[in-house]
Amino acid sequence: RETIRLDLEATFYFTHLILVFKSPRPAAMVLERSQDFGETWMPYKYFAANCSATFGLEDDVSQRGAICTSRYSSPFPCTGGEVIYRALSPPYAAEDPYSAEAQAQLKITNLRLSVLEGCVLAGASCFYPYEMRSHYQLMASLSRNQFYQLSVSCSILPFLSCTPASAALFLHPSPALNRVHGKCMCKHNTAGSHCQHCAPLYNDQPWQAADGKTGAPKECQSCKCNGHADTCHFDMDAWLASGNRSGGICDNCQHNTEGQHCQRCKPGFYRDLRKPFSAPDACKPCSCHPLGSAALPLGPRTFCDPSTGDCPCKPGVAGPHCDRCLPGYWGFGAYGCRPCDCARSCDPRTGDCRSSSSDVAWHHEVPPFQAVLNESEPTWSWEDEQGFSALRHSGKCECKEQVLGNPKVFCGMKYTYVIKTKILSAHDKGSHAEVNVKIKKVLKSTKLKILRGKRTLYPESWTNRGCTCPILNPGLEYLVAGHEDVRTGRLIVNMKSFVHQWKSALGRKVLEILKSDC
């Protein structure tokens, strides 16, 4: 078995092969190709005097398109006999040699001819010099108008094939002696050693070779990246979804942009309408205050409106950057701003009512306080950090005693909770006050689930008025009617709340009002 192998060291498009033998042609041989530099091989054509006996295949002389032929296996002529193979002959015939199917058939990196059985003259004789018996002469066309010649000395002259209508071929000097390399000069936005794919930013449509009949180019189209990307890639799903109009996906969008075409600003940035979107600084960073801004729906972080730059503010917060309280609100912080408990506006930082004679700072003197406690409850004792009681400041702060009058007025307040509770302790947290209580009875609850047991009340009026009204003295029991803050889960007490020291008769009356009038 003899083998003639051409390792081309690059991808070529093989169109036809012409073998000229100086000896009688072999009785059996196979022509094979590789597209992966010799890793795997696929047959092009089998040659045999008897295809059925040698390879178990049909003969294309009798069956058109068969992969085996007996046309070129006769021992005559003794010299100069030809073997011709066309890569696009049946069953691989194609009208357009640049179609995807044709190119898959033509593409090779290696070509191998294996002589499996020598010529059997069967009594006939051919006379030729001995030195011509040991080799064949081969002329192979690897692409149109480009030939390889192989002789016993194995001298090969290769030529590089460029994709037609997409490039021009020019000779490129090589440092190797007696060797000249071809180099493709790509046109029509193509790239690659053979101009076989589109340039990095021109992959909006699938690459196509030029028209095989007219030679008209199929120019690569640029991706619509708005000037924010240097490369793109073709995506078949995007191409089909667009109705075969655009399949380019921009890579690594720059200038704080994102999207298939880098067509929008990233979260945390907004579009500056004064500049064209192709400008490098068209996307400006959001400047939302971290405390006053709220997270957008479905977003874990605080971002501004990508079209206007406006920040989403928390309740009671205002300003384009959400950095201050609305008029009538105070206490800028993590939960936004709270409404003022004043007839007029209040100080936005302290909540103190403006022009009010009752404005007074908290006093920390601890006057003596005695209370009759139930023996089953622990004895009350003041601690330094427990800071709020109407008994702990001067007489400037006067809390009016509340009276349960007209039931319609009570129902009109639309209290969301009514409880009987015992005050356990009060604590100054700086920005707000907390009163620890033990709920003994729940007369009404709306959205929050209120159970008997220990709970915390949040007297907003204590912090924004500087006066501990309504009165909640530790150790005593009260009937408290107020409003729930569903967002924070808090039970709020303020000047609108109804707070009165507990009496059984009062409890029965409120319960009757809740059932019959509210």
Image (spheres, rainbow, N blue to C red):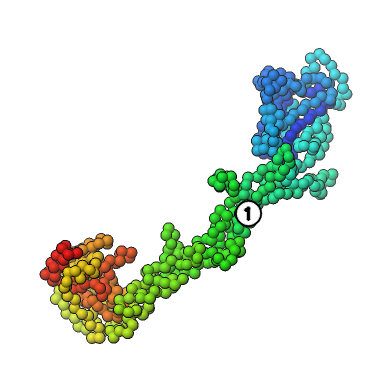
| Amino acid residing under circle 1 | Thr
Relative height, residue 104 to residue 270 (above, below): above
Query: Taking 473 as reference, is 324 left or right?
Result: right
Q: Is residue 113 visible?
A: no
Relative height, residue 469 to residue 185 (above, below): below
Q: Quadrant of residue 244?
A: top right
Residue 234 in the image, given as x and y percentages of width and height: 60, 48
Local crowd size for mark 1, using a 10 Å CA cut-off: few (<14), some (14–19), many (≥20): some
Query: Taking 275 as reference, is 195 left or right?
Result: right
Front residue of 266 and 393: 266
Query: Taking 434 as reference, is 128 left or right?
Result: right
Residue at the left extreme, as displayed: 505
Q: Is residue 157 visible?
A: yes
Residue 351 in the image, given as x and y percentages of width and height: 34, 78
Relative height, residue 252 to residue 165 (above, below): below
Front residue of 357 and 92: 357
Residue 326 in the image, given as x and y percentages of width and height: 39, 74
Quadrant in which the C terminus is drawn: bottom left
Callout 1 secondary element: strand
- Residue at 55% across, 65% down: 273
Residue position for label 1: 231
- Residue at 79% across, 40% down: 158
Query: Taking 438 as reference, is 351 left or right?
Result: right
Q: Quadrant of residue 277?
A: bottom right
- Residue at 75% across, 32% down: 16
Residue 94 in the image, given as x and y percentages of width and height: 68, 32
- Residue at 68% across, 23% down: 64
Quadrant in which the N terminus is drawn: top right
